[in-house]
Image (cartoon, grey):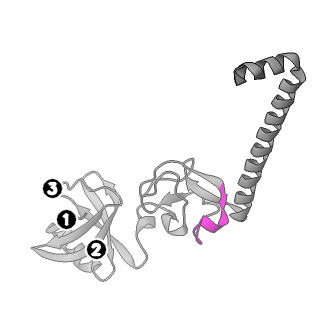
Amino acid sequence: MHPVARLRYLLARRPWLYWLVVVVVAGAIAFAVAGAVGGVDDARRAWGATRGVVVAATALAPGDALVDRVEVRLLPGPILPARALTEVAPDAVARQHVAAGEVLVDVDVTAGHVPVALVPTGWQGVPVAEAVPTGAIVGDRVAATSGGVVLADEAVVVGRNDGSLVVAVPAADAPGVAAAASSGELTILLAP
């Protein structure tokens, strides 16, 4: 007699054997699942304590208000930056580009009035009227030139209105950039 036929004959005559096998297999599966869940819990505990930190819910551009665009999430402490924020002020704005899901640190945000709040420490903001629009937006890195001479090779756009920009430059370069801007000879170069 074929082995499968013999097994079917045995189970037909003794149904309790079938149910015994079902219970044993179900117990083995339950034991394996419990072990896997325990392993996940052990791995989670190995990461250490969690902390509530501020995370960007959507992509942020420089000058964007953070209200309703960030959320607090519990994340494992060992993977968090040392300067991660646990809360933000109601008037806080993004100082630089931040991707959605990124943990915010203190250099990513600033409180206060835009564009002044976006001017880096030790720099000054210079208003610039654009005769020919560059298309530069807040957060773009630019250079300031006049008469073929680079006045500020390191500058960033911190404000934009119709036909004018506010460009932050290092304090040492600010007087020359302001003089060229007031005479109408300043040219803004877009930097990569």
**Residue 90 visible to the viewer:** no
| Sequence-first disc among 2 and 1 | 2
For the residues marked 2 and 3, what is the alpha-carbon distance in whole angstroms? Answer: 20 Å
Residue 12 relative to residue 105: left or right: right
Q: Which percent across, then down, holds residue 26?
A: 80, 34
Residue 166 relative to residue 182: left or right: right
Task: Tell me the kind of residue under disc 3.
Answer: Val
Does residue 122 belong to the magenta stretch? no
- The residue at the point 82 percent across, 20 percent down is 11
- The residue at the point 60 percent across, 58 percent down is 54
| Sequence-first disc among 1 and 3 | 3
| Sequence-first disc among 2 and 3 | 3
Per the image, the residue denoted by label 3 is 132
Q: Is mark 2 on a helix, strand or loop?
A: strand
Relative to the observer, which residue lies in front, 19 or 147? 19
Quarter of the image that includes the N terminus: top right
Q: Is mark 1 on a helix, strand or loop?
A: strand
Q: Is mark 3 on a helix, strand or loop?
A: loop
For the residues marked 1 and 3, what is the alpha-carbon distance in whole angstroms? Answer: 11 Å
Q: Which percent across, then down, holds residue 182?
A: 20, 69
Label 3 environment density (alpha carbons within 10 Å; few <14, some 14–19, many ≥20): few
- The residue at the point 51 percent across, 63 percent down is 109
Label 1 environment density (alpha carbons within 10 Å; few <14, some 14–19, many ≥20): some
Task: Tell me the kind of residue under disc 1.
Answer: Leu
Indicate which label's residue lies in the foreground, 2 or 3.
2
On residue 154, the disc is 2
Q: Give the range drawn in magenta.
A: 74-84
Residue 62 relative to residue 146: left or right: right
Per the image, the residue denoted by label 1 is 189
Q: Which percent across, then down, holds residue 10?
A: 83, 21
Relative to the observer, which residue lies in front, 80 or 105? 80
